[in-house]
Image (tube, rainbow, N blue to C red):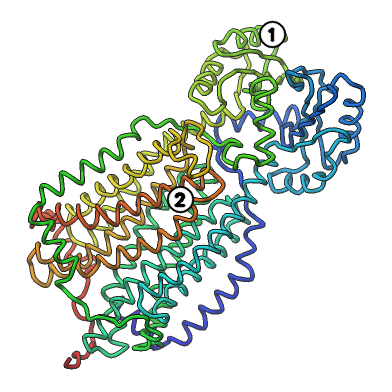
Amino acid sequence: MFERLGRTMVRRRWWVVGLALAFMAFGGLWGTQVFGSLTSEGFNDPASESSRAVERAEAALGRTGNDVVVLYTGRDMTVDDPAFRQAVTGTLEALPADVVTGTASFWSTDSPALVSQDRHATYAVLTLAGDDETERGESLEKIKDDLAAPGLQTQVGGITVVNRDIRDRVAADIAFAETISIPVLLVLLVLVFGSVAAASLSLAIGGLAILGAFTALRGMSYLTDVSVFSINVVTILGLGLAIDYGLFMVGRFREELARGLGVEDAVARTMATAGRTVAISGVTVAVSLAGLLIFPMTFLRSMGLGGLSAVVVAMVAALTVLPALLGILGPRVEALSVRRQKPPQDHGFWYRLAHSIMRRPIVYTVGVLAILLLAGAPFLRVEFGGIDPRVLPAGTESRVVSEAVDRDFVQNSQLPIEAIVTFSDQADLERYVTAVRDVEGVTGAEITGVSGDVARLTTFYLDDPISAEARSLVDRIRAVPAPPGGEVLVSGLTARLDDQLKSVGDLLPWMALIIIGATFILLFLAFGSVVLPIKAIVMNILSLGASFGALVLIFQDGHLSGLLNFTSTGTLEATQPILVLAVVFGLSMDYEVFLMSRIREEYDRTGDNTTAVAVGLQRSGRVITSAALLILVVIGLFSISGITFIKLIGVAMLIAVLVDATIVRALLVPATMRLLGEANWWAPAPLRRFYSRHGLHESQEPEGVSAPAAV
């Protein structure tokens, strides 16, 4: 199949390239407009109790919320001075009612929580018009220049402002990362590929993958919310997989040309071998990312959709456009060379390294396993948390406002736990309020809204809103019996986080089952063994464990926080490790498929397991390490993002890819394959028969290939 596809792409090469250019033009004009359709929200489960509480409160009490928090500070006067009051109330009253639908200030509520302890500051809470974050962001733009009060220092924060700042910072970080990484990547690509012409092929596939994913995401944005953070995954996977596939296929094409094959036959042979591997790899990575689609959170689902789009387009482009371009270039793939290409060797550095390792397989296996297990051990004490303004760089105005309100005002006055209570009798409601006040950890509780038989109870506490202690308080409040015949739904930041963690915990085993089960089936169909898939899955888990252990040390414990310039909250945001798991598991399987395909090819030829491992590592070791180096350039610059959880993703992927491409593939794989010996290729007799009939075999010589010219 792949051989025929390769020949077709060569014979129709100009049509294929023309269609690809048209697609890129469409993606550049229409797909890149996706940035205006993205949201920075989406970390909550829409079916959770906290989400249902918000819906009920908005239906019965109207929408309220701290969309904008405006902090007013008077250095020479207090809130008790008439001039202070006039400056604030005059400013707020002048705001357009069709843009600001609700305003709460000290003078409108008489709430002491809105006055600082030294009485030199107060804050006003604004509710903006708009059904979603995009519309509320537009409302913010209309009033942002009208919030300053004369004679007072004015600082603006709140949920909508924080989301805007995160969105703007992500866009700026992506632009900065691309500005730095693309030139570095170009130089490294030329050095790794050895010629400008060969390097340009991966860039072409990467451009198609990224623009294709942008186009797909914009189309999806008309059907569902899409997170702005999916752009990061699109960039990483689009470029990363394009580099991987380009290296593997161009390298194989060069080998076939060196054997003396003509251009069409060389492309056919490349597609029958490397093309098959790319297809298996692409499907494996796609399956890993598809595991994210089972989560109800827009953030994770968007990452899955964006990643899937990038993977599918990169794979399809590598199997269609790349062979067409190889057909056009032919031997000119070496044009503008920066170094002379050496003929493929079966007894080079990687061959000698593999034999050295396989002479001491137990030493290497035990040593590497000990290192990986030790590196992963800190993850056993992980504490999961959520996102708050501390993900922004220190000094960002919206973060400054949040920190000032928590420091100088009633603790957590911006982020209370709210209970939406339905009741039939006022006395029952009062007894419920009294019961909540008596809950351990509650510092105060008051009714802040009533409409018919629905009331909002606002509860204050002293713990960090994203801490385990605060989440435990939510559970204790939820355990308080509802008024007779009524119902209580608990919401607020802490309750949303509690619901998110429970939802993730419930679905994570299913995600793992999907990824592991599908990966096992794909690898069996590719290599005809039940041992190799199990070994590959275990090694991927070890790589991920080492990365997750490092995350605990760096982001939870705060080590390297000064160097990496972030504020540790003592927790890890729960959705980020899940995203890293899906992406890194896919990338690790990418390298596994590359390595095992060459080993299996050599094993089928010689029947010698030890020789097959050594030759397979020799043929693929440079490709894997080069691909890892290039993708580390792309990933690494995301680790300097100003948004902490984007930085976390970059650092986690960087560590995982580095570990996987070096000590796992170069050391642990040869050692374990030597220990297992012929058992590497074992499968029960029924499965062997199934593989012989239906497996994704790699043909040894495509039909119609002419004999190589004498060299």
Q: Is residue 362 left or right of residue 554?
A: left
Mark 2 or 1: the one toward you: 2
Return the residue nearer the eye: 117 or 703: 117
Mark 1 belongs to which amino acid? Answer: Glu
Q: Quadrant of residue 278?
A: bottom left
How many numbered circles are shown?
Answer: 2
In the rendered image, the quadrant that contains the C terminus is bottom left
Residue at point 43%, 67% (across, down): 314
- On the image, the x and y values in percent for residue 498 come to 51, 28
Q: Within 10 angstroms of label 2, few (less than 14), some, or many (20 or more) residues?
A: many
Q: Earlier in the sequence, mark 2 or mark 1?
A: 1
Tell me if residue 86 can be seen: yes
- On the image, the x and y values in percent for residue 261 come to 25, 88
Check residue 650 in the rendering and tell me which mark sits there, or answer none. Answer: 2
Return the residue nearer the eye: 219 or 542: 542
- On the image, the x and y values in percent for residue 14 come to 47, 87
Q: Is residue 69 left or right of residue 552?
A: right
Local SS, label 2: helix
Residue at point 20%, 54% (across, down): 667
Q: Quadrant of residue 545?
A: top left
Mark 2 belongs to which amino acid? Answer: Gly
- On the image, the x and y values in percent for residue 420 come to 66, 22
Q: Is residue 289 left or right of residue 389?
A: left
In the rendered image, the quadrant that contains the N terminus is bottom left
Residue at point 37%, 88% (across, down): 332
Q: Is residue 655 left or right of residue 610?
A: right
Per the image, the residue denoted by label 1 is 430
Instruction: Compute the Cα span from label 2 to label 1.
Output: 50 Å
